[in-house]
Image (cartoon, helix red, strand yellow):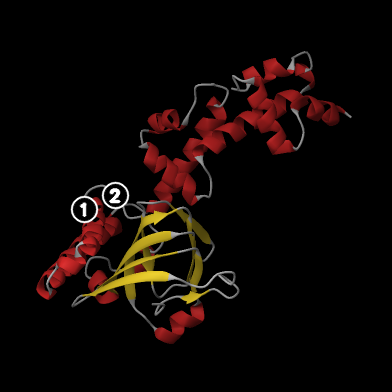
């Protein structure tokens, strides 16, 4: 089961390791359908050197409450439905709760034909529109119907999966660097939220509409940075209120007025969220900041 990964030292010590694995082997690839409880697994640099596996994989998170993938200094958060590209020659660590995932492993030699530098794809999300979306449906359908397929039919399903995956990987290689696009979208969203947070009607849908992207894309980009869009909006409102509370020019403003000017339509909600961020209610914080 763990030919590519190993249990992280000290991880999963409280409960036994339990999982279910279905494996389909094709001429040029293999597909794994893996489900189990919480686990922390890694592919260390030493393991990469020792087994010298040389494949590129597309990993589809079918179901998981939380999945985090760490590649070097980059930590990625996956949600159900996400597909991420990994390179077996690069160290990785995966932490996940109860989950089900489907992975398609393709030899690097095949990927080289559509992408001269497949290692650069590691850590990218595979787009769910177009061929990526069709591939995702095909992976899930193949595993769900695998027991009803003949040997020849399984081989055909695997070949179709490989060809679709190569087309999707080739498209990613030809597209602008996803990391650059995601970073630009993230900072644009943060700037817009900081500017418009005093609008009590601002929500993730409004941010996505302003940036002309889907709400799912916005959520995915923020998750990549370990943040949530709604949490960013509320944090910006709290930060704006804190500036008003600390400003000598606004000493005449009541707490309720500061809450309203900061995008809070509910005074009690303002008190609760400010205390969560700063450990005390706004009025107490104002007095302490003036002491």
- Left or right position of 225 against 216: right
Q: Position of residue 48 (x, y in %)?
A: 44, 80
State the residue position of label 1.
Answer: 134
In the rendered image, which quarter contains the C terminus?
Answer: top right
Quarter location, residue 154: bottom left
* Residue located at (24% from left, 64% from top): 143
Position of 240 with respect to 39 (left or right) is right
The residue identified by callout 2 is 128
Q: Residue at x 51, y 58 (%)?
A: 75
- Tell me the element at label 2: loop
Can residue 117 be seen from the camera position used here?
A: no
- Where disc 1 sits, the SS reads helix
Looking at the image, residue 100 sits to the left or right of residue 158; the answer is right
Q: Residue furthest right?
A: 291
Pinpoint residue 26: horizontal percent, then vertical percent.
20, 75
Looking at this rendering, what residue extends furthest in the bottom direction? Answer: 50
């Amino acid at each position: 089961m763990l030919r590519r990964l190993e249990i992280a030292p000290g991880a999963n010590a409280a409960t036994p390791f339990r999982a279910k694995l279905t494996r389909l082997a094709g001429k040029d690839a293999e597909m794994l359908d893996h489900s189990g409880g919480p686990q922390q697994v890694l592919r260390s640099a030493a393991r990469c050197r020792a087994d010298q596996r040389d494949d590129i994989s597309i990993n589809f998170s079918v179901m998981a409450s939380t999945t985090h993938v760490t590649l070097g200094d980059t930590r990625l958060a996956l949600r159900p439905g996400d597909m991420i590209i990994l390179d077996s020659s690069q160290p990785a660590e995966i932490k996940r709760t109860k989950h089900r995932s489907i992975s398609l492993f393709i030899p690097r030699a095949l990927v080289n034909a559509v992408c001269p530098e497949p290692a650069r794809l590691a850590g990218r999300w595979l787009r769910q529109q177009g061929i990526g979306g069709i591939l995702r449906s095909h992976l899930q359908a193949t595993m769900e119907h695998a027991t009803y397929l003949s040997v020849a039919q399984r081989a055909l399903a695997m070949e179709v999966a490989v060809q679709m995956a190569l087309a999707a990987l080739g498209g990613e290689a030809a597209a602008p660097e996803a990391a650059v696009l995601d970073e630009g979208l993230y900072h644009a969203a943060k700037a817009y939220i900081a500017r418009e947070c005093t609008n009590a009607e601002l929500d993730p849908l409004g941010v996505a509409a302003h940036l002309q992207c889907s709400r799912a894309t916005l959520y995915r980009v923020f998750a990549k940075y370990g943040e949530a869009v709604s949490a960013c909006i509320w944090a910006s409102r709290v930060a704006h209120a804190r500036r008003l509370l600390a400003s000598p020019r606004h000493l005449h403003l009541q707490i309720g007025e500061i809450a309203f000017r900061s995008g809070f339509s509910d005074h009690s909600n303002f008190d609760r969220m400010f205390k969560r961020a700063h450990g005390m209610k706004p009025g107490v914080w104002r007095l302490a900041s003036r002491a």
